[in-house]
């Protein structure tokens, strides 16, 4: 509790400095973003104490169609004050087109900001030396969900390397079961789960993070042998007979939030539908209630297995970055508050929260679930070692990261391994 | 007309075909509606036909899905917003289209046929094509060679923008339908009124409008359903980032798509709730609606 | 014919311009600005009330002003000027909201992705070479053929057969017509529930998969039953399928039995099932419309013509083909035209179900995706122009027909 009181003091003093005592009572600040449902409610709750203190009314309206709507809003001149982009690429693009106000111009203390969110994260929102993206909450993607009890009962051990994972998968298939859950239907964003797999493999093959960064910035083409290798390994998971429960039908037609459901159901022989599910930390919010309360206990994670020898550990993650469209004292207040260590307290304490706040000084004991705390520590650790990489598809230009990459992964899933070359060539062609 | 007592030897076949078509058409809604009264876990556990077969369905019957959607915050406001957009967007095009229809039906002027063809042709312009130029027009007006033809209006994100957008998109059909309807009115009545020296304005108000009420009502029904069910125009012109600007369709999509997992129980009840107003309007004004459609199409 | 003086001609032109251009512009601008200013000043209730009052009556105020100006013109010209005044606001709005954007779009289709520099026909070349565009065009053609044909077909059947009933006509028509009142988003949700797929061992809750898995032997998805591994791809069982991903029939027994046979079989095998399942939604939604219009047309057939057919002892089918269809030919053409236009504009169904993934895209969806997803203004405009080009033959055909009719 000490920290929050301290935070309050910080805010109070900031208010005193920023507005010289003048009141912002009743000022309205509109925020939009891709958060919906419980996440949106949690985000809104973060502002309850803030509104009490400052009188600034903050209202958040999320939309599952945010990426398209914000484009139209920018075109129409009717923009919100702040937008929470799920992809830093979107922030950079909006900044380049001159729609955004930089954090520097808003009077954010950049040194403090860099110190509290790591320079890698801060750098993601940079355009021509100015910073337009404010860091927010993150999730960890380099994890595989499994149920220890089911592993133990069958004498399986947690795979530490890719080869071990494949061996385990083959064993499970040989025993008449399916090792993986895999579903990537996601309304207008179908296909991103496969891009996540590709990214995790890219981080662990070739020169690791070095190749990864080159791939993101298009220094190596999309049909480079390293990328092809990653696609081939992904195809091995997707297309080996019996690996994925339900086969390609499941991969393409199952909503990603429901993809893990087979793991929680037993078939006629008493076996779960699948044993491993590679999915980001936020997936717990999508589980049935009774399973969700046991997250980290009954169903927990092992790190995505290591691949090429000699590469340091790396972690893949993603998250939201906010961008600012209008400049007013009230907006400045909100921005400073959103970058303060106390910002995420209300949301973190919600039992349904699975989002991880990026601020290093955030009191992780506030998280409602142990597993969230563990994963938060993993992110902080990776960031400190510069081993954390942001989701590549979110950093690539939108026509690739939000377009051809997703689309071709869907095509790859249904067309089979023979399509790898064509898929990669098509993506390469679409790079602007 | 003695069509009703004709001896049609194949009447049972007629009925059989009709009943099977009707069943096919009602079937999709049937399973959907039934499922909306089942508890969330039951929807996932067993299919609706199985639960009816086992009798589970009747034991588990619940209104919980409906109350969950119905008592979400500010659903009433979204209903209000939908009506606040729909009603003006229905009335405004009628007033100006009725005059235009009158001109096209009963008056002579140069280029009339060409202009009417333009009205018909405009019906085929896809609405999506207009969206971007229109938001730019609403934002910064039109300038041609340094001359401001239309000044910057800056009305994006207000109700006004949606009213006008729907007016513009609804006008071709309104003008077309009403002109067609008026063409069907007895010409002699209008001509005799003119000979009596009545002005166009008074002929319009005293004779044509009262006689065209059912045509107007038909278009009104059509436009009402269209605007109420619209999703795209509201999203584009009415900055949906403001919670107070949500309409029913976008509100439902927030609840339904937005919630975690495939929340079928909310998707079902949400869709049913959003259908209530259109179905009430449709069934109570069906007569006009159909008559209007016929007026437009039968004569060709 | 009276000769007009130069001055009168000028006056006539001036008033015409006022009626068709300036005065509707005033109508539009003054309301837009008034409502904009009021938006922040008064409550939403008041705004709606004022919007209704002003929106419906402001035009009369302007008309009465215009009438005074028109009185300046020669008396025999007044009627025509008044007609222009009446038609003015409607024509102006149609031009501003539909034609102006269309012209701008055509202009933009020759520009690059940011709409800054000209690229000639590059975007058009792209649209006929890009594989995805070609698939989109193919889908659009499939939609046109199937949706237009089947709505007309079922519409005629329902329209004709309900006419033969003593009672219950309204009931049947209402049922078939009801989907018209449901939004495309709602209709898509209804059908998504039918096509729902869930991976095993979850139970299938979509009826299509429910029927599929309950016929034939049960699939065990690699389970060991009595020491034998039963693979999920065993040919002997029917496993659940993701319906909206089936780009052909190769995953079905019927498709496999057709393979490598005649050319007709080849076409059938390549039938894009997912596209067909999506266009079914549109047929479901629009058949009622066609049925109601046809039914009215059939009722308008004079009773003696029908009776003549009956006395001749012609069969029901023969009467339908040789009397009814020719009589309502023009109605069929009108409904057909309307359906063609509606299909070309079809957007919501694909947008809320597959978003064009796995070869289900349509032109209108592709257009919006190019704009907001790939942010290529040039290409987006090109797709829009393609939609427009598709309907040009229809306008020409209809114009021709209209001329033919009016010359009769």
Image (spheres, coloured by chain):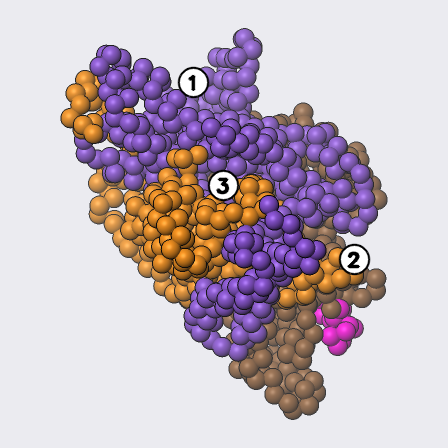
Chain colours: A brown, B orange, C purple
Report how far apart the C-alphas of labels 3 and 2 lie in the structure: 41 Å
Q: Chain of mark 3?
A: C
Number of the label disc, if any, that sits on residue C187: none
Q: Quadrant of residue A2?
A: bottom right
Report how far apart the C-alphas of labels 1 and 3 lie in the structure: 35 Å
Mark 1 or 3, closer to the camera: 3
Above or below residue C180? Residue B83 is below
Q: Where are the magenta residues, as a range?
A: A102-117
Looking at the rendering, in which quadrant would you find the N terminus of chain C? top right
Report how far apart the C-alphas of labels 2 and 1 lie in the structure: 72 Å
Q: Which residue is nearer to you in this view: C27 or B188?
A: B188
Number of the label disc, if any, that sits on residue C349: 3
Q: Which element carries disc 3, helix, strand or loop?
A: helix
Give the x, y percent position of residue A330: 64, 78
- Kindly check if marks 3 and 2 are in contact, taking CB atoms under 8 A apart as contact: no
Give the x, y percent position of residue A299: 50, 50
* Disc 2 and disc 1 on one polypeptide chain: no
Q: Which residue is nearer to you in this view: B207 or C217?
A: B207
């Amino acid at each position: 509790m000490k920290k929050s009181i301290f935070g309050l003091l910080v805010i109070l003093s900031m208010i005193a400095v920023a507005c010289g005592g003048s009141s912002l009572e009743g000022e309205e600040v509109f925020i939009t973003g891709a958060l919906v449902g419980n996440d949106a409610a949690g985000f809104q709750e973060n502002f309850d104490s803030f509104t009490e203190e400052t009188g600034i009314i903050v209202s958040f309206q999320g939309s599952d169609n945010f990426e398209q709507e914000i484009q139209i809003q920018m075109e129409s001149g009717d923009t919100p004050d702040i937008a929470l982009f799920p992809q830093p690429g979107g922030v950079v693009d909006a900044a380049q087109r001159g729609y955004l106000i930089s954090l520097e111009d808003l009077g954010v203390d950049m040194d403090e900001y860099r110190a509290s969110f790591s320079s890698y994260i801060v750098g993601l929102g940079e355009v021509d030396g100015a910073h337009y993206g404010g860091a927010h909450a993150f999730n960890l993607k380099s994890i595989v969900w499994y149920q220890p009890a089911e592993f133990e009962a069958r004498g399986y051990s947690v795979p530490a390397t890719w080869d071990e994972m494949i061996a385990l998968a083959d064993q499970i298939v040989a025993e008449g079961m399916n090792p993986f859950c895999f579903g990537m239907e996601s309304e207008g964003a179908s296909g991103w789960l496969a891009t996540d797999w590709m990214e995790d493999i890219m981080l662990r093959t070739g020169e690791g993070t070095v190749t990864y960064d080159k791939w993101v910035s298009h220094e190596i083409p999309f049909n480079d042998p390293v990328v092809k290798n990653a696609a081939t390994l992904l195809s091995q998971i997707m297309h080996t007979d019996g690996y994925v429960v339900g086969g390609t039908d499941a991969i393409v037609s199952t909503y990603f939030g429901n993809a893990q459901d087979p793991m929680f159901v037993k078939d006629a022989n008493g076996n779960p539908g699948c044993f491993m599910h590679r999915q980001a930390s936020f997936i717990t919010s999508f589980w049935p209630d009774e399973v969700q309360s046991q997250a980290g206990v009954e169903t927990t994670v092992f790190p995505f297995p290591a691949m090429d020898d000699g590469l340091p550990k790396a972690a893949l993650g993603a998250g939201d970055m906010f961008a600012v469209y209008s400049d007013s004292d009230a907006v400045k207040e909100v921005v400073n508050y959103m970058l303060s260590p106390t910002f995420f307290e209300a949301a973190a304490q919600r039992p349904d929260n699975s989002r991880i706040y990026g601020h290093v000084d955030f009191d992780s004991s506030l998280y409602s679930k142990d597993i969230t705390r563990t994963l938060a520590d993993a992110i902080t650790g990776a960031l400190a070692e510069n081993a954390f990489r942001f989701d590549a598809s979110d950093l690539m230009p939108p026509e690739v990261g939000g377009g051809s990459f997703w689309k071709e992964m869907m095509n790859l899933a249904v067309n089979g391994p023979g399509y790898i070359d064509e898929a990669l060539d098509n993506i390469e062609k679409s790079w602007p | 007309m003695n069509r009703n007592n004709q001896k049609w030897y194949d009447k049972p076949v007629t009925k059989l075909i009709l009943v099977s078509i009707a069943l096919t058409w009602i079937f999709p809604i049937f399973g959907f509606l039934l499922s909306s009264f089942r508890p969330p876990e039951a929807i996932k556990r067993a299919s609706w036909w199985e639960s009816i077969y086992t009798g589970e369905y009747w034991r588990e019957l619940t209104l919980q899905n409906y109350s969950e959607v119905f008592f979400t915050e500010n659903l009433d406001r979204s209903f209000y917003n939908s009506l606040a957009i729909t009603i003006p967007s229905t009335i405004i095009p009628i007033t100006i289209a009725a005059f235009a229809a009158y001109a096209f039906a009963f008056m002579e002027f140069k280029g009339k046929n060409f202009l009417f063809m333009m009205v018909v042709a405009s019906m085929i312009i896809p609405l999506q094509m207009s969206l971007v130029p229109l938001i730019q027009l609403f934002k910064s007006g039109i300038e041609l060679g340094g001359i401001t033809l239309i000044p910057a209006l800056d009305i994006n994100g207000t109700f006004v923008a949606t009213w006008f957008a729907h007016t513009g998109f609804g006008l071709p059909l309104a003008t077309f339908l009403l002109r067609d309807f008026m063409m069907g009115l007895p010409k002699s009545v209008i001509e005799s009124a003119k000979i009596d020296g009545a002005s166009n304005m008074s002929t319009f108000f005293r004779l044509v409008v009262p006689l065209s009420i059912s045509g107007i009502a038909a278009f009104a029904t059509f436009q009402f359903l269209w605007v109420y069910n619209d999703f795209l125009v509201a999203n584009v012109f009415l900055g949906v980032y403001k919670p107070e600007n949500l309409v029913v369709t976008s509100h439902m999509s927030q609840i339904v798509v937005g919630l975690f997992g495939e929340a079928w129980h909310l998707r079902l009840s949400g869709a049913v709730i959003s259908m209530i107003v259109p179905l009430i309007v449709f069934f109570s004004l069906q007569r006009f609606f159909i008559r209007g459609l016929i007026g437009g199409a039968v004569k060709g | 014919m009276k000769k007009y003086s130069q001055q009168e001609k000028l006056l006539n032109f001036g008033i015409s311009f006022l009626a068709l251009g300036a005065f509707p512009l005033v109508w539009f601008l003054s309301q837009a600005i008034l409502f904009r200013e009021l938006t922040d000043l008064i409550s939403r209730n008041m705004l709606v009330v004022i919007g209704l009052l002003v929106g419906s009556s402001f035009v009369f105020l302007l008309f009465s002003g215009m009438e005074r100006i028109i009185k300046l013109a020669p008396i025999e010209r007044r009627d025509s000027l008044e007609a222009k005044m009446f038609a003015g606001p409607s024509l102006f709005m149609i031009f501003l909201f539909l034609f102006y954007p269309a012209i701008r779009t055509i202009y933009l289709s020759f520009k690059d992705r940011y709409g800054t520099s000209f690229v000639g026909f590059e975007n058009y070349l792209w649209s006929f070479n890009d594989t995805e565009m070609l698939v989109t065009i193919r889908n659009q053609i499939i939609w046109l053929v199937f949706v237009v044909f089947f709505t007309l077909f079922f519409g005629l059947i329902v329209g004709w057969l309900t006419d033969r009933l003593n009672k219950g006509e309204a009931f049947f028509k209402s049922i078939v017509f009801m989907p018209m009142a449901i939004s495309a988003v709602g209709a898509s949700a209804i059908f998504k529930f039918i096509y729902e797929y869930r991976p095993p061992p979850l139970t299938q809750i979509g009826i299509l998969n429910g029927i599929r898995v309950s016929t034939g032997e049960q699939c065990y998805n690699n389970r060991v039953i009595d020491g034998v591994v039963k693979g999920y791809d065993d040919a002997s069982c029917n496993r659940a399928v993701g319906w909206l991903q089936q780009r052909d029939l190769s995953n079905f027994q019927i498709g496999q039995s057709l393979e490598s046979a005649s050319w007709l079989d080849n076409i059938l095998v390549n039938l894009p099932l997912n596209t067909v399942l999506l266009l079914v939604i549109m047929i479901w939604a629009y058949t009622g419309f066609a049925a109601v219009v046809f039914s009215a047309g059939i009722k308008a057939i004079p009773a003696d013509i029908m009776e003549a057919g009956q006395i001749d002892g012609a069969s029901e089918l023969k009467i339908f083909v040789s009397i009814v269809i020719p009589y309502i030919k023009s109605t069929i053409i009108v409904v057909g035209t309307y359906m063609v236009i509606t299909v070309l504009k079809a957007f919501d169904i694909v947008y809320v179900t597959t978003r064009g993934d796995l070869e289900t895209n349509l032109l209108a969806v592709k257009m919006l995706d190019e704009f907001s997803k790939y942010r290529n203004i040039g290409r987006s405009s090109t797709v829009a122009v393609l939609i427009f080009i598709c309907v040009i033959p229809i306008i020409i055909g209809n114009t021709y027909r209209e001329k033919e009719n009016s010359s009769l």
